[in-house]
Structure formats: structure tokens, C-alpha cells
Image: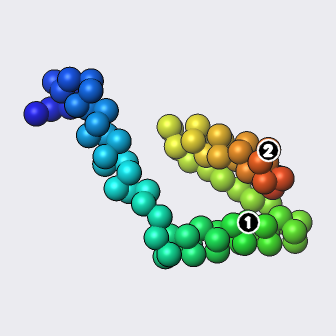
Amino acid sequence: MPLNKMHPKDFLTSYLNDFSDLVKPDKDIIHKLVEISDLLKSTHDQGKKILIFGNGGSAAISSHFSVDLTKNAGLRCI
């Protein structure tokens, strides 16, 4: 059944189930996220710029992510 024909409850259940399958943490994902965190901190500590970019809707997401890193992690991003 097409998504636009689904009952909202069925759509949300399906969406959240799919999403939860994608974000289940495992050792590999945690390790990669720690590596990214270390790289961002190292880049910042060296006085280098952290550039985050996107196109279209991804530009809005990257802008939001940049603000989150600046506010929550103290990493200046552009």
C-alpha cells in the first residue's frame, strides 16, 4: 500500500520501526562515532576550520548540525 494511503497510525509505526532498525548501536558504529568526535575535536584544537555543508534540504540539516556542535560541543563550525 502506498504511504499516502496508509492510516497515520500504520504509517508512524512503519516509519519508527524502519528508523529504529537504522540506528541500532553496535560496537562498530560507536567506534566510528568516537573517531569522528576525536577528529572534530583535534581539528578544532589545531585552530583549523570545521566546514559542514549541504545542498537543498541537506543545507538546512548541515546548518542545524553546525549550530548543535557550536552550542553543545563548543566546536566552532561554518
Relative placement, left or right, of 22 versus 56 is: left
Q: Position of residue 75 (x, y in %)?
A: 81, 55
Of residues 9 and 55, the one nearer the viewer is 9
Residue plotted at (73% across, 66% down): 40
Give the quadrant of the N terminus. top left
Which residue occupies 38% across, 56% down? 22
Nearer-the-camera pick, 6 or 53:
6
Q: Earlier in the sequence, mark 2 or mark 1?
A: 1
Q: Is residue 78 visible?
A: no
Instruction: Identify which residue is drawn at 80% across, 60% down.
Output: 49
Q: Report the Cα–Cα distance between label 2 and label 1.
A: 14 Å
Display coloring: rainbow
Using the rendered image of the protein, determine whether residue 47 is visible from the camera's viewpoint: yes
Image position of 71 (left or right of 47) = left
Dot 2: what SS? helix
* Nearer to us in this view, 33 or 62: 33
Q: Nearer the viewer, residue 2 or 22?
A: 22
User: Disc 1 marks which amino acid?
Assistant: Leu
Reading the image, the residue beneath label 2 is 71
Q: Is residue 9 above or below residue 69?
A: above
Total numbered labels: 2
Q: Position of residue 41 (x, y in %)?
A: 78, 67
Residue at the disc numbered 1: 40
What is the crowding at mark 1: few (fewer than 14 residues within 10 Å), some, or many (at least 20)?
some
